[in-house]
Image (cartoon, rainbow, N blue to C red):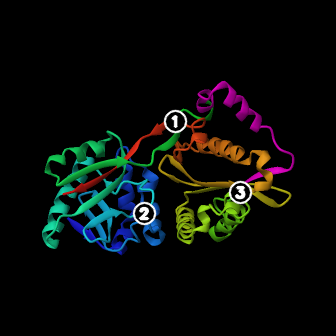
C-alpha cells in the first residue's frame, strides 16, 4: 500500500488515468487526473477546500480522497458535483484497498473514518463491490447523485440522427442550412490563453452573465475551467469550436476528450443572437466532428430537460457515505 503526496500523484497521472479507463461504469473524464487536479487546486464545496490528501495506490488500484473539516471525513478531490468516482482500478481490488486503508488509518487516528464516494453508477461494478463490504460497515447511506445524459456515437452520426424523433430530426436538418456569413472555427490547437479569453468574452455577453448566474463569474470555477482548458490543450484533448460572423465571436462550445469519450464542459452565445440557434448549430457540428474522429460516447453532463431530445440514455448516479 503506497500513500502518495499530491506531487507524487501528479507525477503518476498516466498510471492513474489508465486505472480509471479500466474501471467499469465510471465517468472516465471526470474521474481522471486532469479534472481531479483542477478541482483540488481551485474548487471549494460547501465542505470547504481540500486539505489533507488521502491518495493511495496498491497494485493498480487507487483511492483518491482529501480530508476536510471535521477531521476524519474524506471526500473526493472534486466534491462540488461529485461527477467522478474516487475509487479506480479493478472494482474488487479497489474496494479491498479501501477496506484495508480505512482500517489502517482508523487505527492510526484512533477513530473511524467516513468516506463520501460519488460518481457511482447504480448497480454498476464498483457499486456492487462496495455492497459486499456493507456488513463490515459502521454506517452506510446511499444518496442521489448527479445523473448524466449521454449520446451514443458508436455507430456514427447518421445512426444517432436516425434515433431522434421525426420532429426533432426535421429541426436538426434545418440547422444544416448555412447562415450567410457565419463560419465555425476550431480553436482546439490555438494558444490556450487566447482560447480562454475568447470563451470568457462570449460568456460575458450571455444572458446568464447579465442575470449574474454565469459559472465563470465565480472566481474558483473560472480558475477551474481555465486550468482544465490548459491541461487538455497540453495533452491534445481540448475541443473548442467558435461560431463567428464579420470577425466577431458569437458562440462557443467547449469540451474535452478522454479515451473514446467526449465530455461537454460549457457552451454559450451572445444574447443578441439568440434567434440564430447557434448553440444547437454548434452542438450538431461538434457531434459530426466527434463521430468522424471515432468518439463512441458524447457526454452532455448533468441531466437537464432540454438535453433529453439529444441524448440516447440517462445514466443514474448515486453517492455513498461509508464509515468503515
> Which mark is first along the chain, 3 or 2?
2
| Labelled disc at residue 188 | none
**Residue 60: where, in percent of width, then height?**
27, 57
Residue holding disc 2: 36
Q: Is residue 165 magenta?
A: yes
Tell me: residue 322, above or below residue 111. above
**Residue 159: where, in percent of width, then height?**
59, 29
Judging depth in this view, the residue of 153 and 254 nearest the camera is 254
Judging depth in this view, the residue of 129 and 159 nearest the camera is 129
| Labelled disc at residue 207 | 3
> Which mark is first along the chain, 1 or 2?
2
- The Cα–Cα distance between marks 2 and 3, rounded to whole angstroms, is 29 Å
The answer to which image quadrant residue 78 occupies is: bottom left
Tell me: residue 30, above or below residue 121. below
**Residue 83: where, in percent of width, then height?**
43, 53
> Which mark is first along the chain, 3 or 1?
1
Q: Quadrant of the C terminus?
A: bottom left
Circle nearer the viewer, 2 or 3: 3
**Residue drawn 62% across the image and 27% down it:** 162
**Residue drawn 42% across the image and 63% down it:** 36
> Are dots 2 and 3 in contact, CB under 8 Å?
no
Circle nearer the viewer, 1 or 3: 3
Q: Which residues are magenta?
A: 159-185
Q: Is residue 208 magenta?
A: no
Amino acid at each position: 500500500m503506497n500513500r502518495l503526496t499530491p506531487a507524487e500523484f501528479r507525477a503518476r497521472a498516466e498510471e492513474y488515468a489508465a486505472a480509471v479507463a479500466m474501471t467499469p461504469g465510471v465517468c472516465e473524464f471526470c474521474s481522471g487526473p486532469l479534472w481531479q487536479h483542477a478541482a483540488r487546486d481551485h474548487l471549494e464545496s460547501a465542505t470547504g477546500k481540500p486539505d489533507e490528501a488521502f491518495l493511495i495506490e496498491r497494485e493498480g488500484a487507487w483511492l483518491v480522497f482529501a480530508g476536510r473539516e471535521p477531521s476524519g471525513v474524506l471526500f473526493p478531490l472534486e466534491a462540488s458535483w461529485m461527477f467522478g468516482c474516487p475509487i479506480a482500478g479493478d472494482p474488487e481490488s479497489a474496494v479491498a484497498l479501501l477496506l484495508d486503508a480505512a482500517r489502517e488509518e482508523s487505527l492510526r487516528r484512533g477513530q473511524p473514518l467516513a468516506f463520501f464516494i460519488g460518481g457511482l453508477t447504480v448497480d454498476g461494478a464498483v457499486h456492487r463491490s462496495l455492497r459486499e463490504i456493507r456488513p463490515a460497515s459502521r454506517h452506510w447511506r446511499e444518496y442521489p447523485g448527479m445523473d448524466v445524459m449521454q449520446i451514443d456515437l458508436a455507430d456514427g452520426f447518421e445512426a444517432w440522427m436516425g434515433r431522434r424523433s421525426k420532429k426533432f430530426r426535421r429541426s436538426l436538418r434545418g440547422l444544416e442550412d448555412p447562415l450567410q456569413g457565419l463560419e465555425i472555427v476550431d480553436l482546439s490547437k490555438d494558444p490556450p490563453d487566447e482560447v480562454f479569453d475568447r470563451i470568457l468574452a462570449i460568456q460575458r455577453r450571455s444572458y446568464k452573465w447579465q442575470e449574474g448566474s454565469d459559472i465563470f463569474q465565480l472566481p474558483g470555477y473560472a480558475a477551474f475551467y481555465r486550468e482544465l482548458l490548459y491541461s487538455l490543450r497540453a495533452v491534445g484533448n481540448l475541443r473548442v469550436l467558435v461560431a463567428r460572423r464579420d470577425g466577431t465571436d458569437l458562440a462557443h462550445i467547449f469540451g474535452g476528450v478522454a479515451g473514446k469519450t467526449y465530455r461537454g464542459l460549457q457552451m454559450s452565445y451572445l444574447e443578441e443572437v439568440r434567434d440564430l440557434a447557434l448553440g444547437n448549430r454548434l452542438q450538431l457540428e461538434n457531434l459530426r466532428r466527434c463521430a468522424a474522429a471515432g468518439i463512441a460516447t458524447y457526454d452532455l453532463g448533468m441531466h437537464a430537460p432540454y438535453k433529453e431530445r439529444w441524448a440516447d440514455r440517462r445514466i443514474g448516479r448515486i453517492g455513498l457515505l461509508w464509515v468503515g
